[in-house]
């Protein structure tokens, strides 16, 4: 009886603590759909640079919707107008070769876009800031805050030592791309296809070694509030919480952008909305406001932002950590009846496990993930910067 | 109709009888004077008492110029045009409101009212009354000179020892008597001898005794409360019930009325009950905030025995911070605010704790599914000094440990509160000390923890004079502090501690010495001391940088003068002026910015350094308060009020709910005090026959310098609040309907409020605009609110109640679109509060059972079964989006989406009627 009382009480409290979260379908107002989005960040590196013009998509059906047939120009403070041509292969992308003369520190740029219906959209004028340099990029192991008895592997955090050559560089954004090598668990040795085994000898390892490059989604920003300080040590970048990425080497490319204020403010807003977890005490989200205005129809909101920056780039390679455990990618092996072998192999080849002596297959079938590293999204093309 | 005829006939017969009595007043000459003077004159000249309720005649004035007029006629003429009626009672008179005293029930009266049901039950409680007569001896026996001597008496309640104002003593032999003042004290000048005396007061059993006077001396008499209840279930106190006297925008909640209302965890909650009244709306489940007449959640002052509270809830708003057992009632001023209150723009919740009994030990308590409480009161020196203490604590942790969930196992939720007071009452001096402590601690696994506490104390000494003046000096201290550790995002984990200290002293005066005026005036000073704390990185991998949010100090000085003035019999005016001066104090470095440029570092033009305790910037302005109360007839009135208020203290909150770690912030060099003007008008009527009362109130409120956070404001990121808070304007208006039925088997009330609350922050440059400078609904803008409360009384012991709540969905900023930045999808949101979440609808029910009604019993119990959210609706609280596997999904967050059943037990020493 006493036990029952406790169970009822437990149930009550469980219910209290279990707030209900259910899927919700939003009926948006027409004005909030298909808004014009212009985004561009021109850096101080001479070469081809571009901006994107697109339409926003509904939040529950996100997709990139290019907005073609616009006319875009960059107006410099030197009175030069640089037309941006729409890419034939990438609709909605408008670009041009920009020479170093137009990208000197202090040069102001303004983006002017004319849409197919004749609306003129202009950004504010943005001045190219001072460049800043990266002294070194390195990583350290840090404790896993979620470590428990079943998992206590550490995390790896990257840091940058950097300097702003002049104190005019105040706002920073680090854009990071990681590349890591990984391997499928097996080479292809036995293939069963259309009721016939084929022995591949030597085993085919062409799909065993992959490299995967990804953008780090963290938005890492810094505003230097101290006008007398222009050298910074051990500034934290992103943290890698999957140490298997270091098993065969890890490469990180860091672009350090010294931003104009509008670009920085825009990314601060993006970050604020991206990191909002939701829930009872969540910070109220915000409407991201950039520096673009529709001069023809001032009431029509233009999303996105046009900014300029001075960029420096550095890449580092991290050798595998010997103390980290070896990691096998998820791979399922299963036994299959002869009848199923025949049925399934008509449609696609089955990769079959070797008997260990390279003489005969076993009845154990390997899933595609076991032999094709590309199943995990990588490529078998070794990047040019890969050291080995 | 039959009742009217019977009453009328009885009145005519009664008046005829009086005419034969020959008791006359020789010379009556009064001009617009309080009717109480006439009663005193009658007692003085004829020895006849006139019994009345002080509250009924408080505003009644009369004019009479007659000679040799009978007492009955004089009374009839004096009370003509009011809703008060005279009835003979033995040799005396009784003044009743809206009725005359009748000697017998009319024939064939149907027993369909709750009063009839209770008659039998009251027999249990009253028992047989024995004729008692005892002797009181005053003074020492000595040879009497026969000269008159002065004797002084104190009349108090037998149960509590509290004084009974306006009790009367009548000495039969000399046909004279006296009336007790508001401290229950009276004096008589009388020759030594043996007398037959009677002490009476409405609501108490009269006491007849033999008074032996030997010489000068003192005596004390205790009266027992009459066990016959006039009304068994009062949802609101007398002031609310009397529609003619109700101030525009005033609500009163008695703790007794919370007993039947269904609640979430079995905890009686006066604040949640207030949200069932028109114009008051909760900011939601899991939040303690209230929005009143389109005002922000930080615009309400919560004061318990003069201690201001900066957090009014336990467990994130699910449980009230006060133990109901120590509370007496709550006055809510949301329209006209008397001059003694200030500092908040929307309302004042003046919460009064019980006064501990002066002569009887009392104990009461309760057990709910999450907590247990005990309250004790006891005399320390009988009739002079008494004390009270209450403690409540939760015991929910053991339940958490039994749940098979790793995160919940590792969680803990704890709260407790302690309150106590000592009251002293001797002679003309009254003094009181009251203390309050409340603490909460909540840990959710290893993800976050909150710990917050309120502490406060008040000490007051007052001195009363029979001339009708009272002075009171009060010292007040209040502190709210919290500490938070947030580990939801290990890279951004932080710890933070915050505290606000409030030191206040005030001197208040009340005077009724002037005939037409009821004056109150006073002075006050408040010193605020805030430590906004340091936000420190927490854990080994947190990327937070340490941020010192700084300390703040502020001094608020105030003076007020308020008068209740009777212009004519039907028109009363309340006028008040409150002058407040406020300045933030140093030490402080204040940045000045280029005009109309963003308040960011690059636009700093100068910095000002202020030394410790030096005034940084004085803000001072008068608050004008006016209220006109015009009685249209005996059953109705029209009230118009104008109210001005200032606020120097704000909450920094940019979440939908008020989190326990919400910081308070003082006005400063840049952030000006907010100011509001409210005009309201109310029409109040009641119908005696159906026991219905109804009101319609309209209001318009304009608030300037309302602080509103900029998009993405981070209150933990910088001490420079001026960079993330702008000030704008709120326009709020609404109409409130209220109908209530009382004292029936089926009673309750319905309320409907239509309101709008619109914010506009439109500065000179883009940086000083929110929402592009366009108007937008406030977070608490809820246009339609309907509340229904019904109680069905099967008997005095068994009552069932049901609450129905409907509200328009709250405004929300919805994720409206996705665009791409550097290949990453970015969710963008609509204009601020452009959309609304779905409407809110909830039904709660409760069943309350009282123990038996026997008069003589040691302990009385009552039980309550509550069902919260009977229909199990998933009422939405917020909507948010989350990217999952490349798809952005929207979710509706409901705090409580299932029916919650709770059972609670309340007990007290004594019987049903024991307070």
Image: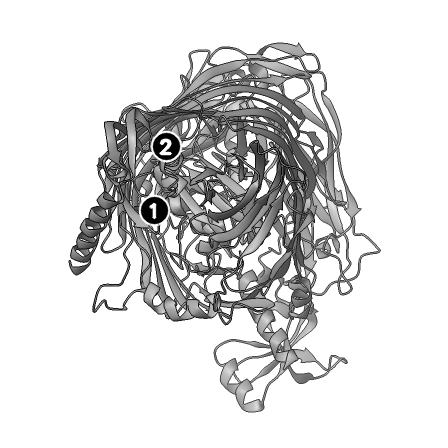
Is disc 2 in contact with disc 1, using a CB cutoff of under 8 Å? no
Between B264 and B607, the one lying in front of the other is B264
The chain identifier of the residue carrying mark 1 reads B
Q: Residue B392, percent across and down?
A: 64, 55
Q: Mark 2 points at which residue?
A: B41
Please state which of the two labelled residues, at mark 2 or mark 1, is closer to the viewer: 2
- Up the image or down, A262 lies above or below B233; here it is above
Question: What crowding class fits label 2: few (fewer than 14 Cα within 10 Å), some (14-19), or many (20 or more)?
Answer: some
Left-right relation of B394 to B265: right
Q: In which quarter of the image is the N terminus of chain A?
A: bottom right
Q: Residue A312, percent across and down?
A: 64, 28
Q: Residue A122, percent across and down?
A: 37, 23
Between B237 and B330, the one lying in front of the other is B237
Q: Residue B486, percent across and down?
A: 66, 46
Q: Which secondary structure lies at badge 2? A: helix
Looking at the rendering, which quadrant does residue B95 occupy?
top left
Count of numbered labels shown in the rendering: 2
Name the residue rendered at 23%, 38% in the picture.
B73
Disc ID at residue B94? 1
Between B425 and A246, the one lying in front of the other is B425
Q: Which secondary structure lies at badge 1? A: strand
Between B6 and B402, the one lying in front of the other is B6
The chain identifier of the residue carrying mark 2 reads B
In space, the residues marked 2 and 1 are separated at their CA atoms by: 15 Å
């Amino acid at each position: 009886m006493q036990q029952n009382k406790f169970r009822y009480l437990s149930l009550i409290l469980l219910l209290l603590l279990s707030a209900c979260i259910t899927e919700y379908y939003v009926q948006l107002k027409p004005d909030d759909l298909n808004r014009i989005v212009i985004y561009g960040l021109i850096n101080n590196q001479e070469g081809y640079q571009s901006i994107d013009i697109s339409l926003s998509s509904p939040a529950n059906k996100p997709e990139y919707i290019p907005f073609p047939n616009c006319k875009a120009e960059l107006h410099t403070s030197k009175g030069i107008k640089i037309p941006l041509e729409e890419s034939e292969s990438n609709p909605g992308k408008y670009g041009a070769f920009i020479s170093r003369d137009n990208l000197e520190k202090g040069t102001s740029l303004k983006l002017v876009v004319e849409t197919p219906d004749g609306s003129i959209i202009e950004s504010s004028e943005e001045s190219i800031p001072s460049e800043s340099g990266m002294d070194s990029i390195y990583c350290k192991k840090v404790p896993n805050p979620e470590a428990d008895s079943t998992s206590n592997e550490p995390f790896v955090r990257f840091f940058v030592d950097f300097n702003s050559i002049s104190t005019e560089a105040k706002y920073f954004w680090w854009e990071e791309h990681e590349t890591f090598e990984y391997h499928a668990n097996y080479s292809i040795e036995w293939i069963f296809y259309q009721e016939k085994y084929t022995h591949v000898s030597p085993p085919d390892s062409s799909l065993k070694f992959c490299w995967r490059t990804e953008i780090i989604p963290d938005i890492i920003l810094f505003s230097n509030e101290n006008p007398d300080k222009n050298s910074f040590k051990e500034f934290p970048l992103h943290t890698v919480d999957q140490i298997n990425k270091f098993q065969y080497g890890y490469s990180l490319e860091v672009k350090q952008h010294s931003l104009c204020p509008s670009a920085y403010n825009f990314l601060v807003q993006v970050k604020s909305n991206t990191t909002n977890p939701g829930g009872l005490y969540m910070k109220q989200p915000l409407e991201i406001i950039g520096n673009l205005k529709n001069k023809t129809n001032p009431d029509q909101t233009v999303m996105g932002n046009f900014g300029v920056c001075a960029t420096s780039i550095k890449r580092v390679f991290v050798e595998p950590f010997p103390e980290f455990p070896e990691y096998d990618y998820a791979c399922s092996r299963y036994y299959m009846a002869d009848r199923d072998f025949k049925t399934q192999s008509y449609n696609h080849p089955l990769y079959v496990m070797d008997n260990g002596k390279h003489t005969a297959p076993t009845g154990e079938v390997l899933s595609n993930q076991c032999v094709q590293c590309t199943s995990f999204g990588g490529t078998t093309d070794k990047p040019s910067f890969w050291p080995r | 109709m039959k009742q009217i005829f019977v009453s009328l006939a009885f009145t005519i017969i009664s008046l005829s009888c009086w005419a034969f009595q020959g008791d006359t007043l020789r010379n009556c000459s009064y001009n617009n004077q309080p009717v109480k003077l006439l009663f005193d004159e009658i007692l003085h000249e004829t020895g006849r008492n006139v019994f009345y309720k002080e509250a009924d005649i408080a505003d009644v004035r009369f004019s009479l110029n007659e000679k040799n007029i009978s007492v009955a006629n004089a009374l009839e003429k004096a009370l003509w045009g009011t809703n008060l009626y005279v009835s003979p009672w033995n040799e005396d008179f009784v003044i009743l409101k809206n009725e005359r005293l009748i000697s017998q029930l009319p024939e064939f009266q149907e027993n369909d009212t709750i009063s009839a049901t209770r008659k039998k039950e009251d027999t249990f409680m009253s028992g047989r009354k024995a004729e008692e007569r005892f002797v009181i001896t005053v003074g020492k026996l000595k040879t009497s000179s026969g000269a008159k001597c002065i004797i002084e008496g104190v009349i108090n309640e037998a149960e509590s020892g509290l004084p009974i104002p306006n009790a009367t003593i009548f000495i039969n032999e000399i046909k004279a008597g006296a009336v007790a003042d508001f401290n229950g004290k009276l004096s008589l000048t009388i020759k030594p001898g043996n007398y037959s005396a009677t002490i009476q007061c409405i609501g108490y059993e009269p006491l007849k005794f033999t008074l032996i006077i030997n010489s000068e001396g003192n005596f004390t008499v205790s009266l027992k409360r009459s066990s016959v209840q006039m009304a068994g279930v009062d949802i609101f106190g007398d002031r609310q019930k009397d529609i003619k006297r109700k101030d525009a925008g005033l609500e009163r909640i008695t703790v007794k009325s919370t007993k039947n209302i269904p609640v979430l965890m079995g905890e009686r909650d006066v604040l949640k009950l207030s949200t069932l009244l028109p114009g008051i709306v909760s900011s939601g489940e899991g939040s303690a905030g209230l929005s009143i007449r389109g005002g922000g959640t930080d615009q309400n002052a919560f004061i318990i025995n003069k201690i201001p509270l900066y957090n009014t809830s336990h467990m994130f708003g699910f449980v009230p911070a006060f133990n109901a057992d120590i509370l007496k009632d709550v006055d809510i001023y949301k329209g006209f605010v008397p001059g003694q209150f200030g500092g908040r723009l929307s309302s004042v919740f003046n919460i009064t704790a019980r006064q501990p009994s002066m002569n009887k030990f009392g104990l009461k308590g309760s057990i709910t599914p999450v907590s247990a409480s005990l309250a004790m009161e006891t005399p320390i020196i009988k009739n002079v000094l008494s004390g009270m203490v209450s403690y409540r604590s939760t015991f929910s942790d053991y339940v958490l440990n039994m749940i098979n969930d790793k995160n919940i196992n590792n969680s803990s939720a704890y709260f407790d509160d302690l309150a106590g007071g000592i009251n002293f009452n001797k002679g003309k001096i009254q003094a009181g000390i009251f203390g309050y402590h409340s603490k909460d601690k909540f840990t959710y696994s290893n993800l976050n923890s909150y710990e917050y506490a309120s502490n406060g104390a008040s000490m007051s000494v007052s001195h009363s004079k029979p001339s009708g003046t009272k002075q009171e000096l009060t010292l007040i201290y209040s502190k709210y502090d919290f500490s938070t550790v947030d580990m939801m995002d290990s890279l951004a984990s932080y710890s933070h501690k915050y505290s606000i200290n409030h030191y206040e002293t005030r001197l208040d005066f009340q005077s009724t010495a002037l005939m037409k005026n009821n004056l109150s005036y006073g002075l006050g000073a408040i010193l605020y001391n805030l430590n906004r704390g340091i936000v420190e990185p927490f854990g080994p991998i947190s990327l937070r940088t340490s941020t010192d949010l700084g300390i703040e100090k502020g001094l608020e000085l105030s003076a007020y003068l308020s008068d209740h003035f009777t212009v004519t019999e039907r028109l009363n005016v309340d006028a008040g002026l409150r002058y407040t001066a406020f300045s933030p104090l140093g030490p402080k470095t204040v940045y000045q910015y280029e005009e109309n440029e963003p308040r960011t570092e690059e636009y700093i033009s100068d910095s000002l350094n202020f030394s410790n305790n030096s005034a940084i910037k004085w803000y001072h302005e008068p608050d004008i308060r006016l209220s006109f109360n015009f009685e249209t007839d005996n059953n109705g009135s029209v009230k118009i009020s104008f109210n001005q208020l200032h606020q120097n203290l704000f909450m920094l909150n940019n979440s939908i709910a008020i989190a326990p770690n919400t910081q308070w912030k003082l006005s400063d060099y840049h952030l000006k005090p907010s100011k509001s003007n409210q005009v309201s008008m109310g029409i109040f009527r009641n119908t005696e026959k159906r026991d219905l009362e109804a009101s319609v109130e309209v209001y318009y409120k304009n608030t300037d310098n309302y602080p509103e956070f900029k998009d993405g404001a981070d209150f933990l990121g910088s001490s420079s609040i001026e960079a993330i808070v702008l000030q704008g304007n709120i326009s709020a208006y609404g109409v409130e309907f209220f109908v209530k039925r009382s004292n029936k088997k089926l009673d309750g009330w319905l309320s409907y409020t239509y309101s709008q609350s619109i914010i506009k922050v439109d500065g000179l440059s883009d940086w000083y605009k929110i929402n592009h400078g366009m108007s937008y609904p406030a977070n608490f803008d809820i246009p339609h609110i309907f509340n229904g409360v019904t109680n069905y009384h099967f008997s005095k012991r068994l009552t069932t109640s049901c609450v129905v709540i409907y509200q328009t969905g709250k405004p929300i900023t919805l994720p409206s679109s996705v665009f791409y930045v550097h290949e990453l999808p970015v969710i963008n949101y609509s204009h601020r509060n452009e959309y609304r979440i779905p409407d809110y609808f909830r039904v709660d029910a409760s069943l309350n059972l009282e123990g038996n009604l026997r008069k003589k019993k040691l302990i009385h119990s009552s039980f309550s079964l509550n069902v919260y959210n009977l229909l199990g609706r998933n009422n939405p609280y917020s909507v948010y989006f989350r990217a999952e596997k490349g798809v952005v999904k929207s979710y509706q967050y409901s705090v409580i989406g299932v029916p919650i059943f709770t059972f609670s037990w309340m007990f007290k020493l004594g019987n049903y009627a024991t307070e």
